Image (cartoon, rainbow, N blue to C red):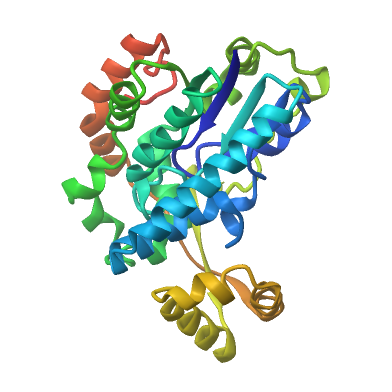
Amino acid sequence: MKTIYIHPVYPKTGTTYIQETVLSKVKEIEKLIEFNEQRTSQGPYFEYFKSNFYKNNINGNYYNFYKKRQNFYDYVFEKIKISKNSKFIISDAGLLDPFGSPGTSNIYLLKDVLKKINNVEKIEVKFLVTIRSQSELIASYYAYRSHYFHDKNNLSLLLKNSDFMENFKFSNLLTHLNEEFENPKILVLPLELLKENSSEYFKNIEDFFQIRLSNEIHKNTKVVNANSKIIDDKKYFYINSYKENIILTLFTKIHGYLKKFDIYDKFISKSNLKNTLKNYLQKFNKKTIKSKIYLTSNQIEMIKNYFKSDNNELEKKYGINLKNLEYY
């Protein structure tokens, strides 16, 4: 039997570290998508999980939906069938991102394809769920994705918004996964464990994937893409800003508008010219530090209290000591 590992969840939980430092170095696990494919607009994965669901809701174009689902199924099934490997992975920090599109609805899209594959080629599905203390995750995520939120300049308002806060209850995602995939094997892996006990962090990965990691990987515990820094005993999170040129802004708006029409699928979506032009224009973007934020001690305490009960249930069910990692 072959195994497909799914690594979804939030950005800013050590996803890039696992992808680049760990998984990309393990030959026994074959990637079903490139780890950076979530940043592109081509390929059956993107078309099914990202662009297609959006257009399907806008236009009610169910033909496109089923066609792209079949394309992704064919793509995955062909790779599994011809490969000599028995382990495969789909790793994308935005796959079930609640603030992305379509977010957690992707659980059902994923289930459809994997169930169809299992009818032909028996597979086992396992989930690697990386988490991070909500007091760290919320601040880091807000800084990373501040342009997504209406209250861009006031994190304190969002902390009072229950709809916003509920997105960071890990049990919500885990309950969905258990219900839809009939209690699959799930490894819940806290990012903090990498710093506090790297040996246990790597052992959890090795046991879950049934592999052995090299000494080189064990020694490399530096998290990449960190967007924070401790200054005078306060942890600041940096909000980046991109100053776009006028032509790129216009190109992006036109591109988004054209996605609503069938002509996009026929002539534009797979065009190399589109991506070449976009990549060229993006070179002129200027990345600057817009501002930095930090959570007060009262805000940190409030966040920990808000998620205390949920985190307590999480550690009981999955055998992890979140209290020692200062989740509550």
**From this viewpoint, which residue is outermost toward the bottom?**
246
Q: Quadrant of the C terminus?
A: top left
In this view of the protein, can residue 302 be seen by the observer? yes
Q: In this view, does 38 lie to the left or right of 324?
A: right
Q: Is residue 67 left or right of residue 312?
A: right
In this view of the protein, can residue 127 be seen by the observer? no
Task: Report the front residue among 6 and 303.
Answer: 6
Q: In this view, does 203 lie to the left or right of 322?
A: right
Tell me where residue 181 appears, x and y as whole percent: 36, 23
Tell me where residue 79 appears, x and y as whole percent: 68, 35
Task: Report the front residue among 158 and 107.
Answer: 107
Q: What residue is at 30 percent from the left and 69 percent from the top?
A: 59
Q: In which quarter of the image is the N terminus?
A: top right
Tell me where residue 273 appears, x and y as whole percent: 69, 78
Height in image: 24 above or below 244? above
Q: Quadrant of residue 143?
A: bottom left
Q: Quadrant of residue 247?
A: bottom right
Height in image: 2 above or below 207? below
Task: Report the front residue among 92 and 292.
Answer: 92
Q: What residue is at 47 percent from the left and 23 percent from the top?
A: 119
Q: Quadrant of residue 109?
A: top left
Q: What residue is at 52 percent from the left and 84 percent from the top?
A: 249
Height in image: 108 above or below 195? below
Q: How many tags in the picture?
A: 0
Height in image: 262 above or below 53? below
Task: Report the front residue among 166 and 324.
Answer: 166
Tell me where residue 275 appears, x and y as whole percent: 66, 72
